[in-house]
């Protein structure tokens, strides 16, 4: 079973104070974009997880292998909770990786969502999307959105979703950094900055929710915001140059996606996105650029056999 699953950009991310349980309450607006991983799930004599680079087919540094991979954890959870005699068994999972690793675009969560969809189909499990979403919440905060795609508000840890009816295509340029960032380290840096009295919090989520139905990229770009951006920039000061370069090239909005370090630049249309991508590629401020658009659908079967 072959499953295609999208990356996400956070159009808005407001982070509450640190709770006693070590988590933060979040309010975010997820937006799926058409940068896809593909996950192939096959029956096998024993379970395994293998990741290959979607561009060149080689190994992908920084992606956990075997049982430590979240896609493997998804398969084990589904087998444990839904296994019936003869209906589940070992699977070989191959991840064809196109979403940046540790880039703030939920690539690992996307692969877990794809594994849920692929294993459910391979094993003939009669599960609804709501049932799959319950398993997704147990795997991680971003996994439920990777199942649904589109644009949605996430609350709680980000795993409680409400769809946003904003169907106008948005055109993006993604600046991919040379090295990823650890999400726990970025949250810890935000806590440190707040304890020191910085930085200011982003505007309320109502601003981006009011802008999205208009379809106006200038208005939407002005409403982008992420509380974690200051922490990501604190850990990687070179991101300031990337953000400035994208805006100077003609983007109408910019934001660090999630915990970073990927920077997302909103453009007025596809031609403008091509121009911004060309300027950024020559600026020397990032490792690579990608042109993308959204909203994109969530994890979907694209083939079998």
Image: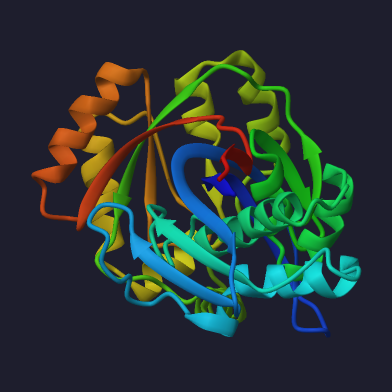
Depth order, front residue of 104/245: 104
Asked whether residue 259 appears in the rendered view, the answer is no
**Residue 198: where, in percent of width, then height?**
54, 70
**Residue 102: where, in percent of width, then height?**
43, 68
Residue at horizontal 75 percent and vertical 76 percent from the top: 23
Image quadrant assignment for residue 93: bottom right
Depth order, front residue of 243/30: 30
Residue at horizontal 78 percent and vertical 72 percent from the top: 77
Residue at horizontal 29 percent and vertical 42 percent from the top: 290
- Give the colour scheme of this rendering: rainbow
Give the answer, above or below, for where 231 lies relative to 269.
below
| 111 displayed left or right of 243 | right
Image quadrant assignment for residue 29: top right
Depth order, front residue of 279/59: 59
Q: Quadrant of the C terminus?
A: top right
| 240 displayed left or right of 130 | left
**Residue 255: where, in percent of width, then height?**
44, 47
């Amino acid at each position: 079973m072959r499953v295609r699953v999208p990356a996400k950009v956070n159009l808005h991310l407001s982070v509450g104070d640190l709770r006693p349980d070590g988590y933060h309450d979040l309010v975010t607006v997820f937006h799926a974009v058409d940068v896809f991983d593909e996950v192939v799930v096959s029956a096998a004599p024993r379970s395994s997880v293998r990741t290959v680079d979607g561009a060149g087919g080689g190994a992908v540094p920084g992606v956990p292998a075997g049982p430590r991979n979240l896609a493997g954890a998804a398969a084990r959870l589904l087998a444990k909770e839904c296994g019936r005699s003869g209906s589940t068994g070992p699977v070989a999972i191959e991840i064809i990786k196109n979403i940046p690793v540790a880039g703030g675009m939920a690539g690992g969560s996307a692969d877990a969502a794809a594994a849920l969809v692929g294993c459910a189909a391979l094993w003939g499990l009669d599960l609804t999307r709501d049932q799959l979403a319950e398993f997704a919440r147990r795997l991680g905060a971003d996994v439920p959105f990777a199942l649904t795609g589109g644009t949605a508000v996430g609350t709680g840890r980000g795993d409680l979703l409400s769809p946003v009816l904003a169907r106008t295509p948005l055109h993006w340029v993604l600046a991919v950094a040379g090295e990823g960032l650890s999400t726990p380290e970025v949250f810890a840096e935000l806590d440190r900055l707040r304890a020191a009295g910085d930085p200011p919090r982003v505007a309320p989520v109502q601003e981006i929710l009011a802008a999205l139905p208009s379809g106006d990229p200038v208005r939407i770009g002005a409403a982008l915001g992420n509380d974690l951006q200051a922490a990501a920039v604190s850990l990687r000061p070179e991101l300031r140059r990337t953000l400035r370069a994208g805006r100077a090239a003609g983007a109408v909005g910019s934001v660090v996606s999630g915990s970073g370090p990927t920077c997302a630049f909103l453009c007025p249309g596809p031609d403008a996105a091509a121009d911004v991508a060309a300027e950024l590629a020559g600026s020397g401020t990032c490792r690579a650029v990608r042109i993308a658009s959204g909203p994109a659908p969530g994890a979907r079967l694209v083939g079998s056999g």
